[in-house]
Image: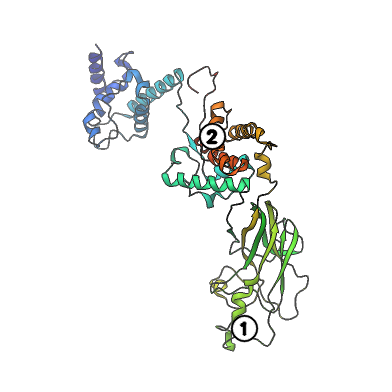
């Protein structure tokens, strides 16, 4: 009977009569497929890769069974792309009638049985990873230094479907977890490292650059740096240079450069005005119409900031390092120099000494002769208790592990979760003591899939299996 209805509907359609005349029980889309689509969209053509989908298995009586394929059919009908040009095509009214019926049927079946599917498991991207570490351990880390760039889709780096995992990325996660656990606990075995903070080459430094620097300063910057241990550290300042590596702005006028730690001045350097007036104030390779310049200034323009380095003792923790010039209240007598146009190629190659010196980079190195801190923001957050005797260590360790895992896994933890992590604590505890055992737990937590991935789970009391 169904075949007869389909055949009758096809005949009616062929003679241009409305689909509604075909009978209320037969969907109006099936005759359209039989006449215009199934010539090409067959299983064999689909297997051969000549058409994107096959329509042979589609049954318009049960649209929900192949809803995704029917959505594609609707899109092609609404755009008028199928059948292709040169093939027999129905009239506009037929297009509209069939597409409208399919849309209504898809909406009806979706409302009757809603199933949006499961949310994709979301790997934390670099920014999310660093934010999670900060929230968990109270430690600021540089994600770009620890992890490779994330995959992008349409310019976004937080699309779960494209945030893949590779063996190389897992190696970086392991290395990052080791480094972060050492920083958080203040591992005295940390080796000295150097971190460079670069200022933008085109940043103007003729005025106060940030509210974190004192009034009366110009140029430079203020930054936060994490010092993992109590110990000696070095701070070296590099001045901005031109294309030929000559330091800018070191003419006749000396400029005072201050270095501050948490707002307190710890060192002062002088840039510019360092040689007698007898020497030509231009480099030996170029002196305008005056010919060759001074070899003294050649050396001075290349090596002035070699000694802009200090070594000092710093307590562990996040400290604010400020570097800036003291702003001059008066100008020297003489002809005022016009401001340098930074938009020209001449600015990048200019070997003259005019303008103001500027800070190019700040390099912080250490720790040297480091010692584990007694307290820091990270240790205060991790060590909820401190065992007074060996008998108390296991109970304290389990308390620390449970709290840490609860925050890292974003869910209540079970006794089994704590037991797994406690095994890592015991293994390292036997080698290096209580702190070493907790450090092993932190390292293990940071590579746990439940920390690296966000997995939304339905509530236990949900009234429907679809959530």
> What residue sits 48% from the left and 40% below the top?
159
Q: Which of 134 and 387 is in front in this view?
A: 387
How far from the left and from the top, in percent, is residue 335? 71, 80
Q: Nearer the viewer, residue 116 or 423?
A: 423
Q: Nearer the viewer, residue 205 or 374?
A: 374
How packed mark 1 is, by other alpha carbons closer than 10 Å (few <14, some 14-19, many 20 or more), is: some
What is the distance, in whole Å, between disc 2 and disc 1 at their CAs?
66 Å
Quadrant of the image containing the N terminus: top left
Q: Is 401 placed above or below 338 here?
A: above
Q: In terms of image quadrants, where is residue 296?
A: bottom right
Q: Which of 56 and 423 is in front in this view?
A: 423
How packed mark 2 is, by other alpha carbons closer than 10 Å (few <14, some 14-19, many 20 or more), is: some
Q: Is 374 placed above or below 303 here?
A: above
> Which labelled disc corresponds to residue 423?
2
Q: In terms of image quadrants, where is residue 3?
A: top left
**Residue 65, visible in the rendered structure:** yes
Q: Are marks 2 and 1 in contact (CB under 8 Å)?
A: no
Closer to us: mark 2 or mark 1? Answer: 2
How far from the left and from the top, in percent, is residue 463? 53, 16
Give the SS element for disc 2. Answer: helix
> Which labelled disc corresponds to residue 296?
1
**Residue 209, visible in the rendered structure:** no
Of mark 2 and mark 1, the one earlier in the sequence is 1
Give the SS element for disc 1. Answer: helix
């Amino acid at each position: 009977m169904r075949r007869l209805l389909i055949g009758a509907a096809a005949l009616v359609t062929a003679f241009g009569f409305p689909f509604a005349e075909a009978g209320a029980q037969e969907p109006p889309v099936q005759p359209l497929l039989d006449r215009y689509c199934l010539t090409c969209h067959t299983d064999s053509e689909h297997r051969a890769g000549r058409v994107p989908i096959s329509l042979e298995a589609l049954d318009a009586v049960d649209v929900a069974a192949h809803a995704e394929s029917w959505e594609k059919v609707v899109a092609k009908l609404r755009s008028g792309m199928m059948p292709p040009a040169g093939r027999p095509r129905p009239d506009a009214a037929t297009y509209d009638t069939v597409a409208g019926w399919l849309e209504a049927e898809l909406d009806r079946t979706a409302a009757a049985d809603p199933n949006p599917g499961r949310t994709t498991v979301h790997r934390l991207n670099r920014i999310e990873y660093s934010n999670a570490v900060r929230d968990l351990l109270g430690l600021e880390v540089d994600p770009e230094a620890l992890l490779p760039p994330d995959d992008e889709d349409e310019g976004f780096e937080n699309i779960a479907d494209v945030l893949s995992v590779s063996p190389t990325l897992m190696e970086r996660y392991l290395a990052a977890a080791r480094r972060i656990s050492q920083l958080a606990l203040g591992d005295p075995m940390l080796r000295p490292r150097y971190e460079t903070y670069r200022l933008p080459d085109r940043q103007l430094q003729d005025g106060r650059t940030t509210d974190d620097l004192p009034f009366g300063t110009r140029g430079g910057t203020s930054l936060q740096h994490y010092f993992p241990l109590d110990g000696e550290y070095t701070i070296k300042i590099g001045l901005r240079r031109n294309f030929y590596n000559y330091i800018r702005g070191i003419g006749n006028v000396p400029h005072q450069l201050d270095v501050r730690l948490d707002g307190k001045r710890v060192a002062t350097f002088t840039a510019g005005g360092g040689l007698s007036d007898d020497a030509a104030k231009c480099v030996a390779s170029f002196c305008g119409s005056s010919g060759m310049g001074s070899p003294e200034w050649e050396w001075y323009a290349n090596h002035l900031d070699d000694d802009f380095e200090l070594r000092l003792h710093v307590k562990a923790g996040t400290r604010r390092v400020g570097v800036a010039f003291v702003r001059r209240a008066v100008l020297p007598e003489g002809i005022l120099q016009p401001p340098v146009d930074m938009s020209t190629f001449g600015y990048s190659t200019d070997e003259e000494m005019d303008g103001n010196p500027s800070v190019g980079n700040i390099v912080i190195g250490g720790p040297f002769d480091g010692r584990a801190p007694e307290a820091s923001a990270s240790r205060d957050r991790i060590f909820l208790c401190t065992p007074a005797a060996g008998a108390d260590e296991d109970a304290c360790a389990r308390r620390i592990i449970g709290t840490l895992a609860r925050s890292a896994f974003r869910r209540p933890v079970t006794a089994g979760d704590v037991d797994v992590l406690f095994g890592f604590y015991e293994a390292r505890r036997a080698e290096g003591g209580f702190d070493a055992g907790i450090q092993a737990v932190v390292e293990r937590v940071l590579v746990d899939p439940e920390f690296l991935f966000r997995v939304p789970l339905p509530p236990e009391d949900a009234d429907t299996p679809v959530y």
